[in-house]
């Protein structure tokens, strides 16, 4: 990495740190543990969750009751993904529907979730909230937690000991506490005959009507609003604003520019939740000059969204060292690596296309290199095979569990090269007068309870 | 080679040779004219493409001039380009301008050749490509075929250059229209005419002499990534596929082949039919002629044809008739000789029979003269000799009585004679005797006794052929074919007996040949002679195991 690049990254890092989590916002004695493995030294989480303060507020909001909040989202929502979000829309909706034992606020402080308290040590002991209930009214028990985990992390579930109806202990995780806030470990149970798993969140999905509009209705707390969530094509996002949407999550600069011109709306950038990276199979183009050292500062202008050069956030990228995960050695994972001199991307992702084009424009693959957009399904197949020179794709910037997140990447990438390109972030366009909106550690926005 | 084969070959040659000459001539003429037409169309299209390129150059120049004017008027662009203002606006500018101007290629470079904004490849900004506008501008016609990079694939376009000055800096604008498959298809008025671009270094398959008709339009070519940075010639190749000609030839060949096959088949069928018409009666005549023999002159040659074969048939019939008459005369002569021989034989036999009688009577005379008292004794002693001689003579008489006396030729009613004969023979009861007699039979000219003997012999033989087994003997009489200008009667005696083999049939009419135990072998011989004496015809149809049919045709009384 060049000196100028290091300097730029350092400046970006400082700017991001100042914006996302100002030092003054972190309470004494509860400094944010680094979400990344290997980051030094991680203090233990407080026994009882910290109170919400204004540090994580995106929109201050105004007091008052809203019966319904109209949400317009560009991404589609698939019940089959619940409770693990695959895009920004699912991140917003699932966070209202499902709960984990604990939560992390934007500064990394631990907040109570389903668990009202916990004790640390060789084993962690969690005590569930007394009023924790599933949507169907059934109390949430320690056995329900173990059963939910068994479906998504059997190794962790095997370490669970049921101590009582509301008490369980589990082996201490490798990372300080983040795994217990991972949506993948949200407590759910199967809904007989239903698409949506039954969760414990404040809302439940009452219906998806004929127009494809999802209605998330409060379970018990009457003060919470009903969410009316509509998936809107990108070209119609401005129309949604004109029609009075209360909340919109978008990265489209045209929409944001239009929202800025509307007096009733506030444009609030969310956290840098995603990162575009270049995945290069081992033995492919990595050895050629340029590909492993892309001039990331020149990439920012290549995309049409709020982006910055990829920032390690003060430590190494989470995927920098996956040895601790003890993944099996992958042999011949990419037998055709480098045979096709093309940078491949998902053609549904315009930003990936822009970045791939820029990489080709920089001549990283030589004069014969091309960018090739594939349909999502074809891209997934090509990514698994690793037969191309490189792949551009977005990955999560914050992960709760490094090893679990690494499984979302193709296996050949564990031994290949992952070149961080750009951090990107969506914006929330919020109608004035809505309740306060905060973001958690993963950048997921939530309306706070009053 | 048979006559029939020669007719077939002749027919085939007469039909196929002119057809082949005609087909080959049509094929060659068609290929020549179509090829000339293709060459004319290709040359015309090449001229049209040259004119289109000239018009395209003017059109691109006009659009670039408008774009340059728009850039000069755009303060936001000016600020971004000169003072580093809104970089994204600058980068997106060429794309929007290119789409608005209806171009496929647009690249804006600064004075150093650095790409400031690119419409066809937005993210190639900051790359140095000074050679592209320089080479395009250096082309004589002002336009060049360029191949530039895009993110996805190289873009081939017809491009030209313009420039715009902003402040103290001059910016070069390269714009063009894509030369893609749609562009080339648009140049082709139909599917048979194809237009392709051959770039330097492209390997071009050399068309065969019949692959296509080709014409070319030359154009300077610039390769953006070419390190040599020189203008090189490219070609727009117009070709007319000969596929339709080949298909047409193929169709003509098929049609010609079908015509040859059809004509050949018709010729063969016609030849075969004609040869059969000619050879079949000749073969039949040859077969009948081969049957003619002195003893087989009853072969009938009949034809109602008016052609040469009919004449030949009638000639053979006349010849057979003459042979039959000659044979009859010969038999008459033989008969007369035989009668003479018979008379001598009778004379001899009677003498032989009378000699002992005369000797006995001479003995009686001597005894009566010399020993009259022993006459009785001598008589008794010689009585046996006399009786033996008399028996011998009676036997002779019986035998000779079977010989036919000269028949009387008088009108005879066939129906009546048949009924009388069948009445006598049918008294025995077995086998079953049937008669089938036509009502309008003419009288025949023969002795009733002769006719009776003929019938008795034939019916007797038919009954004997049954050999005691159940069966039927049918005697029928119908009016026969006219013979010698008069009517005739056909009498058929048919049985269901054992029939005759070929060797038996060959010897059936020989005298003293019989297959019956105790038979004299004279019956059929006598019948045959009696029929011939009556100027009739006797034929036999027989099949071993199935029976025999004896057919007697007798001339009518007026013949």
Image: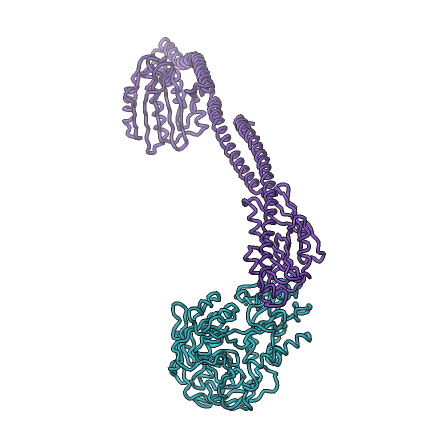
Chain colours: A cyan, B purple
Residue A408 in view here = no
Counting from the top left corner in percent of width and height, residue A85 is at 49, 75
The answer to whether A140 appears left or right of B260 in the picture is left
Compared with residue B416, is residue B268 higher up or lower down, i.e. above or below? below
Residue A51 in view here = yes
Kindly indicate the quadrant of the structure image that contains residue B120.
bottom right
Q: Who is closer to the viewer here, A67 or A143?
A: A67
Residue located farthest toward the front when viewing the structure as drawn: B167
State the residue at coordinates (55%, 29%). B18
Q: Who is closer to the viewer here, A310 or A253?
A: A253
Compared with residue B131, is residue A262 higher up or lower down, i.e. above or below? below
Kindly indicate the quadrant of the structure image that contains residue B239.
top right
Residue located farthest toward the right when viewing the structure as drawn: B228
Compared with residue B273, is residue A157 higher up or lower down, i.e. above or below? below
Compared with residue B279, is residue B175 higher up or lower down, i.e. above or below? below
Counting from the top left corner in percent of width and height, residue A88 is at 50, 73
Q: Who is closer to the viewer here, A215 or A15?
A: A15
Counting from the top left corner in percent of width and height, residue A429 is at 48, 74
**Image quadrant in which the C terminus of chain B is located:** top left
**Image quadrant in which the N terminus of chain B is located:** top right
Counting from the top left corner in percent of width and height, residue B502 is at 45, 28
The answer to whether B540 appears left or right of B263 in the picture is left
Tell me how many marks there are: 0
Kindly indicate the quadrant of the structure image that contains residue A277.
bottom right
The answer to whether A63 appears left or right of B101 in the picture is left
Q: Who is closer to the viewer here, B240 or B440?
A: B240
């Amino acid at each position: 990495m060049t000196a100028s690049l290091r300097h730029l990254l350092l400046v970006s890092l400082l700017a991001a740190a100042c914006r996302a989590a100002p030092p003054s916002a972190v309470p004494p004695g509860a400094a944010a543990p680094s979400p990344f493995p290997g980051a030094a030294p991680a203090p233990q989480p407080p026994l009882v969750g910290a109170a919400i303060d204004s540090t994580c507020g995106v929109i201050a909001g105004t007091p008052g009751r809203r019966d319904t909040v109209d949400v317009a989202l560009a991404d589609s929502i698939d019940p089959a993904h619940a409770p693990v979000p695959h895009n920004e829309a699912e991140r917003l909706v699932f966070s209202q529907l499902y709960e984990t034992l604990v939560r992390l606020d934007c500064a990394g402080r631990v907040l109570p979730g389903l668990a009202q308290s916990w004790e640390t040590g060789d084993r962690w002991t969690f005590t569930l909230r007394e009023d924790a209930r599933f949507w169907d009214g059934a109390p949430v028990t320690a056995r329900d937690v173990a059963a939910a985990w068994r479906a998504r992390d059997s190794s962790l579930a095997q370490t669970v000991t049921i101590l009582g109806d509301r008490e369980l202990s589990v082996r201490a995780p490798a990372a300080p506490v983040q795994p217990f806030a991972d949506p993948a470990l949200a407590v759910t149970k199967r809904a007989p005959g239903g698409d949506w798993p039954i969760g414990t969140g404040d809302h439940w999905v009452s219906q998806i009507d004929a127009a494809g509009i999802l209605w998330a209705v409060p379970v018990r707390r009457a003060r919470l609003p009903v969410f009316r969530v509509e998936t809107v094509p990108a070209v119609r996002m401005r129309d949604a604003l004109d029609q009075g949407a209360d909340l919109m999550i978008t990265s489209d600069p045209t929409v944001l520019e239009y929202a800025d011109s509307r007096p009733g709306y506030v444009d609030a950038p969310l956290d840098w939740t995603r990162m575009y990276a270049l995945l290069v199979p081992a033995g492919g183009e990595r050895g050629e000059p340029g590909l492993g050292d892309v001039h990331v500062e020149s990439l920012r202008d290549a995309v049409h969204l709020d982006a910055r050069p990829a920032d390690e956030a003060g430590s190494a990228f989470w995927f920098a060292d996956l040895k601790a995960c003890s993944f099996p050695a992958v042999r011949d994972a990419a037998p055709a690596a480098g045979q096709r001199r093309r940078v491949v991307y998902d053609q549904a992702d315009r930003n990936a296309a822009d970045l791939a084009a820029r990489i080709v424009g920089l001549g990283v693959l030589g004069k014969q290199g091309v960018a090739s957009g594939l349909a999502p399904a074809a891209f997934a197949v090509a990514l698994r095979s690793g037969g191309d020179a490189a792949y551009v794709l977005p990955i999560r910037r914050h992960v709760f569990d490094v090893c679990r997140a690494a499984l979302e990447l193709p296996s050949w990438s564990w031994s290949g090269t992952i070149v961080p390109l750009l951090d990107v972030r969506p914006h929330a366009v919020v109608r004035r007068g809505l309740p306060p909106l905060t973001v958690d550690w993963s950048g997921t926005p939530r309306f706070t309870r009053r | 080679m048979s006559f029939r084969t020669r007719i077939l070959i002749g027919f085939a040659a007469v039909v196929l040779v002119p057809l082949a000459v005609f087909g080959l001539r049509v094929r060659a003429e068609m290929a020549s004219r179509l090829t000339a037409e293709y060459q004319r169309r290709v040359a015309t299209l090449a001229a049209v493409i040259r004119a289109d390129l000239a018009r395209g150059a003017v059109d691109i120049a006009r659009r670039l001039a408008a774009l340059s004017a728009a850039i000069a008027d755009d303060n936001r662009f000016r600020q971004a380009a000169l003072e580093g203002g809104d970089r994204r606006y600058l980068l997106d500018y060429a794309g929007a301008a290119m789409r608005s101007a209806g171009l496929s290629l647009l690249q804006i470079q600064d004075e150093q050749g650095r790409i400031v904004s690119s419409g066809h490849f937005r993210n190639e900004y900051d790359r140095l490509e000074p050679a592209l506008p320089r080479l395009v501008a250096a082309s004589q016609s002002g336009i060049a075929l360029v191949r530039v990079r895009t993110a996805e694939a190289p873009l081939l376009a017809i491009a030209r250059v313009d420039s715009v000055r902003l402040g103290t800096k001059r910016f070069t604008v390269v714009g063009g229209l894509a030369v893609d498959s749609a562009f080339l298809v648009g140049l082709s008025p139909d599917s048979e005419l194809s237009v392709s671009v051959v770039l330097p270094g492209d390997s071009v398959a050399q068309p065969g002499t019949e692959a296509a008709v080709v014409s070319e339009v030359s154009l300077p070519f610039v390769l953006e990534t070419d390190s040599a940075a020189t203008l090189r010639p490219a070609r727009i190749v117009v070709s007319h596929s000969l596929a339709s000609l080949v298909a047409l030839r193929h169709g003509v060949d098929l049609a010609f082949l079908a015509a040859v096959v059809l004509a050949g088949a018709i010729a063969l069928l016609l030849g075969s039919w004609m040869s059969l018409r000619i050879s079949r009666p000749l073969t039949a005549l040859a077969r009948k002629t081969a049957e003619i023999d002195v003893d087989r002159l009853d072969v009938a040659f009949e034809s109602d044809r008016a052609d040469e074969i009919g004449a030949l048939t009638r000639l053979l019939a006349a010849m057979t008739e003459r042979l039959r008459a000659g044979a009859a005369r010969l038999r008459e002569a033989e008969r007369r000789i035989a009668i003479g021989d018979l008379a001598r034989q009778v004379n001899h036999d009677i003498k032989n029979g009378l000699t002992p009688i005369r000797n006995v009577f001479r003995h009686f005379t001597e005894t009566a003269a010399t020993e009259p008292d022993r006459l009785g004794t001598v008589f008794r002693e010689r009585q046996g000799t006399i009786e033996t001689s008399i028996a011998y003579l009676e036997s002779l008489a019986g035998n000779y009585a079977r010989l036919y006396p000269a028949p009387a030729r008088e009108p005879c009613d066939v129906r009546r004679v048949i009924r009388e004969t069948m009445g006598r023979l049918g008294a025995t009861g077995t086998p079953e005797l049937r008669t089938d007699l036509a009502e309008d039979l003419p009288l025949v000219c023969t002795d009733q006794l002769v006719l009776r003997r003929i019938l008795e012999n034939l019916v007797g033989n038919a009954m004997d052929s049954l050999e005691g087994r159940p069966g039927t003997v049918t005697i029928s009489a119908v009016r026969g074919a006219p013979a010698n200008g008069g009517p005739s009667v056909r009498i058929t005696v048919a049985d269901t007996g054992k029939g005759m083999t070929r060797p038996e049939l060959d010897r059936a009419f020989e005298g003293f040949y019989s297959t019956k135990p105790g038979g004299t072998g004279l019956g059929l011989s006598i019948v045959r002679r009696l029929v011939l004496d009556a100027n009739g015809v006797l034929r036999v149809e027989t099949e071993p195991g199935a029976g025999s049919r004896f057919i007697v045709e007798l001339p009518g009384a007026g013949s």
